[in-house]
Amino acid sequence: MPPASGMGGMGGMGSGMGSEPRLSLPPLSEGVSIAQVTTLLDRLSAADETAFLVSWVEQLAAGRPRLDPALSVRLLRGYREVGRVDRARELAASLPSAPAAWNPLDAGRLAIERAALATIDGRADHAEAELRLASRALASAPRGAGLREQLDLHLTTAQLELRQHRVAPAAAALRLAEHVSERLEDGAWRVPVSMTLGHLAMRLADPRAAAKHYANALTRSPARGQAALRAHGNLAIAHGSTGRFDEARLNAETACAIAAEIASGWRHADAFDVLAIVEIAADRPLSALEALDNALGALGELEQPTLRYQLAGHRTWVLAMLGRAQAAKQWLAKADKFRAEIGVADAIDDQDLVATRARTYESCGQHDEALKAALPHATLLPDAFVTGSLNLVVARSALATNDHDTARAAIERVALSGDKHGWVFPERGASATLWELALKSGDSRVVRYAEKMLAFVTGGAPPPSLPPPRSTMPSVAPPGFDARGSMDDMDPAADNFGDGEVLIYVTTLQGVSRVRQTELAAATAGAALVVDTIAHCLRIFDREVSLERRRALEPLVVQLLRRAREGLSAEEILRAAGGPGPESADAEHRVRVLISRVRDLLGDPAAIERVRDAGEHGRTRYRLSPNVRFALVEPLANN
């Protein structure tokens, strides 16, 4: 949901703040400590009172020739947070470029704010330079000081890395931010921090971590305030994306109720849009359409082009789900119009529009047009939720045109993303044939996810490879509940089944099957090569090799067996082995070294063969020789 700038709760302000009248003018007494003033301003910012903070400091600045650096950097941050970005740019330009006389924390804060503005403006080089300045300044601060600045440094770094589509560094920065946030005192400031951590986790395709952060924010927010409204809405989206539909619906409906009381207009419309998103994920298009009707009614004649664009796109998708093709085409035209009006948009938003366009073509029976629109984007943003929905359109349209290879590749992309991140994509019933096809995959991760989707479709008990239903942390945590406690620290798979025998996956050239561990010998009989990921060993005929000290080779060998038919490209080999990727200077050499080590491990150079894709620009692939009989042993749990 878009950030709100309401009054919020006062949180850690202290009991005296609730009974005293608010100061309409800043105190002008020179006896007031600047440290006390900045502490007050930080608490106001944490209590969602940034708009008042900006007004207060502006009045103070009007009566003085020069603001104290500590006040200047807080005013700069305030301008950015309330959306007065142009004013923030002006203030940042007026401050010293290298404030040597400033204390390290204020200098670090200034560099962080300049980095944030450069990130907004798309000036990545400038942002990186400012972040380096901030890091040096904070390194010279007294030991134990500047934790809040360190937190903002890591958060800004994560946002910049995401803008540059550098997922691994962004995830590392987010982990550092989470670590620093746990070292700070509790209080109202944790609400906006937890919300920011949740937003970053969602953008990094980690909905479970995002839900944990949103729940943290919710437990510290006044029950009927702006902060609770935002937390409920974001928690609804996180839960809905992972199949926790009942909890998601409760959060979304609570957000709608709060918005009706305190935030009419576009915020009320946005809450209904969140409910529509949940109902789409839950495969309830009629309920989603009703929520969108309510959203449009709440929005009325207000401008809000971004929200209108989102509502138009979601309505297009719902109408396509309902088979109302002509109405879907009409709303797709509206979505295109609103998209043109908002100018620059996030890459995921553009991917969402591509998926919506392809889904509209599919609803019209124009499967070739759907494929033409979707295929160029099918491998972009592979971890994003919307890319899974896009690939489902590709798979269904390809199957409708009897292109089974394209359908199989697309549904495997969907399953791998869903299994990795916990996504549960909509239109499960319409895709049931595809999930049946995915059960024939040679990748146990694809099979596991297909079983999960088919369990959703049938409404029956999950297969033995899936965990039984378990109680989860309620979305609205009870008083005193520590949301830092685990939401997902239980083993995600049932260790035992039936009479206590452990079930495992065994993959051969014939596909993936579930067997009891006591049946392992029979399941692998006749296999010359057995890779056991549970025991971390490899057996070739009578020779056994431990993989404990070959951890870089084990995932590569596993991937070679999962992709035994088609093989792996050079890029896929590097990603499977970890370490430097295909962009590294010695990538080609590393591929040759890795394949050479795998051949040595297997004891037969002919066990891995080099093939080339058809066509003038066909890629080189490495695959297991077709005459090698193999078995891959894996646990049921998704670790």
Image (cartoon, rainbow, N blue to C red):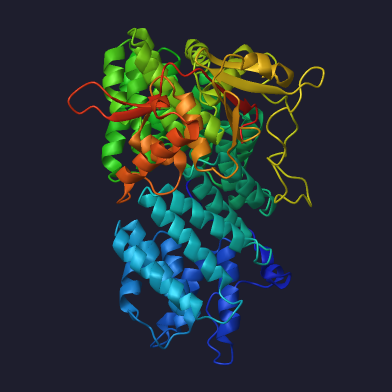
- Percent coordinates x, y for residue 187 in the rendering: 67, 63
Quick check: 373 above or below 510?
A: below
Q: Residue furthest right?
A: 499
Count of numbered tags:
0
Instruction: Report the front residue among 316 and 385.
Output: 385
Q: From where the camera sits, is residue 58 visible?
A: no
- Percent coordinates x, y for residue 627 in the rendering: 43, 16
Q: Quadrant of residue 527?
A: top right
Q: Residue furthest bottom?
A: 31
Instruction: Report the front residue among 61 and 532.
Output: 532
Q: From where the camera sits, is residue 473 visible?
A: yes
Instruction: Report the front residue among 385 and 583.
Output: 583
Q: Is residue 366 left or right of residue 206?
A: left
Q: Quadrant of residue 253?
A: top right
- Percent coordinates x, y for residue 95 in the rendering: 35, 79
Q: Is residue 341 left or right of residue 573?
A: left
